[in-house]
Amino acid sequence: MIEVRNLVKHFGGVRAVDGLDFKIKQGEVFGLIGPNGSGKSTTVNLICGVFPTTDGEILLDGIDLCAIAPHNRVDAGVARTFQNIRLFGELTVWQNLWVAWRDQPGQEQSWISNWFRRSPTRRQEIQKLLEFSGLGDKANHLASNLAFGEQRCLELARAMASKPKLILLDEPAAGMNSAEIKDLCKRVLTMKEMGMTVLLVEHVMELVMNVTDRIIVLNFGKPIAEGTPVEIQNNEAVKSAYFGSSENTEGGAS
Amino acid sequence: MTYFLGILQTIGVHTLLGLSAYLLLLTGQLSLAQAGFFAIGAYVSGILTVIFGLHIFPALAIGAFIAGFFAFLVGFPALRVKGLMLVVATIAFSEIVRLFFFNLSWRVIINGIEVGPDSTQGFREIRYFAANGWEQIDIVGLIWFLVIAVMLVLWWLDQVRAGAVLRAVGADELAAQSSGINLTRVKIAAMTGGGVIAGIGGGLFAHSTTYIDHHTFVILLATFAVSYPILGGLRSVVGTLVAVIFIQGFIIEGLRFIGDYRYLIFGLLIVLVMNLRPQGMIDGHFLADIKKLLGRKTMRGKVDD
């Protein structure tokens, strides 16, 4: 599905991502975790093309994403959400999805109709997606007037509106309460059932440990561990990256 | 009467100018090139009716097309930069256009009279309307027909996906790009559309005043162009119209007795609106209030029935 080979990104002297390799299989929920500043969001931004890579390859079904302009990566099948919510606040909820909308492959509307017609069937499909996202009754609200949790849901729905093969979730649970996190868990698992591949960047372990199939742990831009949630939970290198190693704590105390 | 028709002409032409900036502002781009596009529309359509003897309609259309074409060309380099740098780049464009026409001398003898742009002396003989028996009321009618047509097109644009995409780019470029929107293409389309609208306005301006020279197309004109949609707000095309009526009708015409001090009031007003109502005079809440008001009326009507 997606294969990242020796991904490198330097910002001046800062090595945000420093030789990252991973593969995500079709239909997998893949977790990308690590302490703050370990290069998780940078990895997402590199896959989306927010900035160019310093080195390395990102292959989606064998196609090199780095050679594709950022906006065309959506047509290649990559969609994302943002760590700090970025909705089109002055547009209504359903218009937010309308902007990002892509028709099912094989049922694309003509160019004119895509840009200059208000298709009722498309409107119905958008409504369906809104209902899936729990926003069915908010279609005509302005996005900026939604509650925080609803805005997160809308952003996820907008990413799904482009019918992606791979969806990148950049800390989707940030700021959510535990009920909302449970909802999000269900929704991510439903997305998996629908056949979407998910790359999940997250700090909230409740979400990561419940939905992911495999996890890779980053520290200082380098992978330090990879495995199933259970394996990662018991991994010493991960524990020391997050909490500091026991020797260090003792050394600091003395 | 002539006086009021004259004001209506000015308001109509300036509304087109404001709408051309409005279209580009929807994508979040502040451009001062509108004065340049306006000048291109004015000179090209003027030259076409005066020197080539064209009918007013094809002359306006060609003027608008050429203004749009230049907007398209300018869009590529200009829209690579953002914010303040875009303002500087577009000012430069407007000045280049103005200085080109400042130096343009193309004198031709038609029916024994020498006509055409005469560099520093301006372009004096754009008398298509007078020569073809148009009354002032007809001219005002033509201007407002086109103003309403452009407003309807822009209103319609907001009903289809293209309008939502324009606003999405204006709201958040990164999110729009991540939703698969080609930012460059959308911005250049808006720039081109704005160029066409400004070109129509310029053509109408040249023919309704019969005399143009480079002084008209200074940066002040571009400042007016962007101030209308900023004052009126970007929620609706009507906002721009209201702002033009307010500025041209009230401040510039109504306060004529205080002389050039009224331009100070114009500046003060922009500063005040920027601080008190950065979303413009007519915003979403204002529109919602109007809708509520209308909604209540219809509800009462039902109760009465």
Image (cartoon, helix red, strand yellow):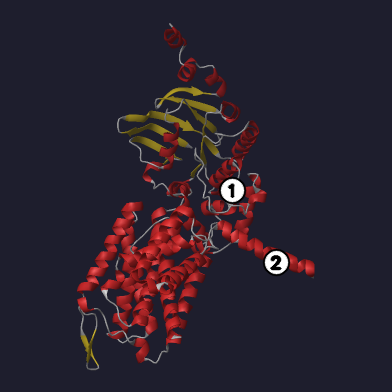
Query: Which residue lies under the disc numbered 2?
Result: B297
**Farthest top residue in view:** A254
Q: Nearer the viewer, mark 2 or mark 1?
A: 2
Closer-to-camera residue (A168/B75):
B75
Q: Secondary structure at mark 1?
A: helix
Instruction: Name the residue located 38 percent from the left edge and 57 percent from the top edge.
Output: B30
Q: Front-most of B83 and A22?
A: B83
> Residue at 65% across / 44% down in the picture?
A134
Q: Amino acid at mark 2?
A: Lys
Asked if marks 2 and 1 fall on the same chain, the answer is: no
Q: Residue A119, image x and y in percent?
A: 59, 61
Residue A29 visible (yes or no): yes
Q: Chain of mark 1?
A: A
**Residue A78 screen position, x and y as percent:** 48, 43
> Mark 2 near mark 1, Cβ–Cβ under 8 Å?
no
Circle 2: is it few (<14), some (14-19), or many (20+) Cα within 10 Å?
few
Q: Which residue is mark 1?
A: A145
Position in image of residue B172 (x %, y %): 46, 49
Q: Is residue B100 above or below residue A13?
A: below
Q: Is residue B232 left or right of residue A17?
A: right
Q: Quadrant of residue B268?
A: bottom left
Q: Is residue B193 left or right of residue B81?
A: right
Q: Nearer the viewer, residue B117 or A64?
A: B117
Residue type indicated by callout 1? Asn
Dot 2: chain letter: B
**Where does the C terminus of chain A fall, quadrant-wise?**
top left
